[in-house]
Amino acid sequence: MKNKRMKIARIEKDFSQEQLAETVGVTRQTIGMIEAGKFNPSLQLCIGICRALGKTLDELFWEEEDEE
């Protein structure tokens, strides 16, 4: 499942994929794969992304039934 909420939060924060990747210590490709739904990040990485974007785990990563 694509992570549209993460992408929207990143854009609202005016971060490029590269900037977010550097902030959380991963590659730009990893951020792109998370946003595309092709990579399942660890809890530690999810927390780092949330902190960088000023969001909660629920706001960025909790799957709701109507989003499927």
Image: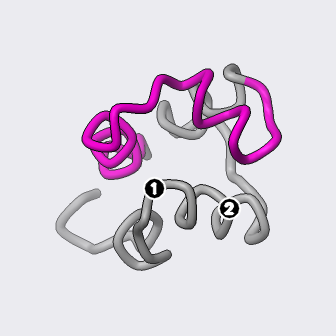
Report whether 62 appears left or right of 20: left
> In the rendered view, how is the structure colored?
one colour
Question: Quick check: 30 above or below 46?
Answer: above
The range drawn in magenta is 2-27
Report whether 59 appears left or right of 49: left
Can you tell which quarter of the image residue 7 is in? Answer: top left
Dot 2 and dot 1 residues touching (CB under 8 Å) = no
Q: Mostly what secondary structure, the magenta segment? A: helix
* Among numbered discs 2 and 1, the one appearing first in the sequence: 2
Can you tell which quarter of the image residue 27 is in? Answer: top right
Nearer to us in this view, 56 or 14: 14
Q: Is residue 15 magenta?
A: yes
Q: Position of residue 50 (x, y in %)?
A: 53, 64
Residue at screen point 31% across, 51% down: 5
SS for dot 1: helix
* Separation of marks 2 and 1 at Cα, in angstroms: 9 Å
Q: Position of residue 1 (x, y in %)?
A: 43, 46
Q: Which residue is mark 1?
A: 53
Q: Which residue is mark 2?
A: 48
Q: Position of residue 24 (x, y in %)?
A: 73, 47
